[in-house]
């Protein structure tokens, strides 16, 4: 009996030590993650953006390199969109119109279609002109559009199979830095004047 008791004590000590070590590791890991995990914005900065080759509304081939050196306001949608896209593109145009001419000159305004089957360069040309003379429309093959959607973490999917199908899609307006990385994103329905103020404070 006494030998059993003696055996039990060390076991309990080991058990307590193990529990303490695990607890310490847990606390330590929490400290580490609080300190070192990138913030949401740092994370998305690294995740959003990338290489692409597309066709602009003037029927010219363009790549991501053509947009380096300027800031870029970019929105993904489709010209048949009944409400969300027209609203956000008007907001983008209004925001840029609130900027000083000097600041506006530092920015490319870009609309990328997520519906290249219907949004040909001709359709895009007519559509972008409706919002702003400087708005650039980009379309491409299904594969090219898939590539840029992945690079910019854009979700888009046909909502139904009818000929007049709608497309569910992400409705962020991204402000990209001059090097093509993300500076900030704006949500659907942003106030254009506030957006302009933020853009002014972010660009140099
Ligand atoms: Ni839309």
Image: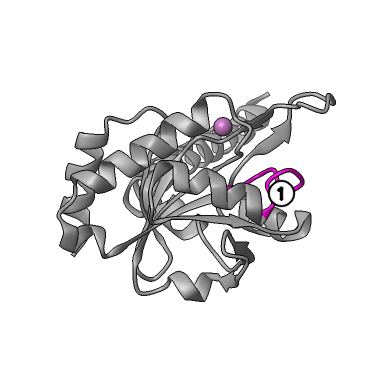
Identity of the residue drawn at 24% across and 58% down: 104
Task: Using the image as rendered, state which of residue 179 and residue 135 is in the foreground.
Answer: 135
Q: Name the quarter where the C terminus is drawn.
A: bottom left
Element type at marker 1? loop
Q: Is residue 115 magenta?
A: yes
In the displayed structure, 75 sits above or below 187; it is below
The x and y percentages for residue 64 are 53, 70
Q: Residue at x 60, y 38 (%)?
A: 79
Q: Which residue is mark 1?
A: 116
Mark 1: few/some/many CA within 10 Å (<14, 14-19, 20+): many
x then y, percent, for residue 143:
77, 58
Q: Position of residue 201 (x, y in %)?
A: 16, 52
Q: Is residue 28 visible?
A: no
Q: Nearer the viewer, residue 35 or 105?
A: 105
Q: Quadrant of ligand 1?
A: top right
Considering the whole magenta stretch, tell me its main secondary structure: loop
């Amino acid at each position: 009996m006494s030998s059993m008791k003696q055996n039990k004590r060390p076991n309990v000590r080991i058990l307590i030590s193990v529990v303490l070590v695990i607890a310490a590791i847990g606390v330590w890991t929490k400290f580490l993650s609080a300190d070192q995990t990138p913030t949401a914005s740092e994370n998305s900065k690294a995740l959003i953006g990338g290489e692409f080759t597309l066709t602009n509304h003037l029927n010219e081939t363009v790549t991501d390199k053509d947009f380096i050196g300027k800031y870029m306001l970019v929105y993904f949608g489709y010209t048949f969109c009944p409400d969300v896209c027209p609203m956000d593109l008007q907001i983008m145009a209004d925001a840029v119109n609130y900027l000083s001419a000097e600041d506006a000159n530092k920015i490319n305004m870009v609309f990328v279609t997520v519906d290249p089957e219907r949004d040909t360069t001709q359709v895009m040309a007519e559509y972008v002109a409706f919002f702003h003379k400087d708005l650039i429309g980009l379309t491409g093959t299904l594969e090219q559009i898939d590539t840029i959607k992945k690079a910019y973490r854009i979700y888009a999917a046909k909502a139904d199979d009818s000929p007049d199908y709608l497309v569910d899609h992400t409705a962020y307006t991204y402000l990209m830095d001059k090097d093509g990385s993300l500076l900030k994103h704006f949500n659907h329905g942003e106030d254009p004047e506030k957006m302009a103020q933020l853009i002014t404070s972010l660009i140099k």
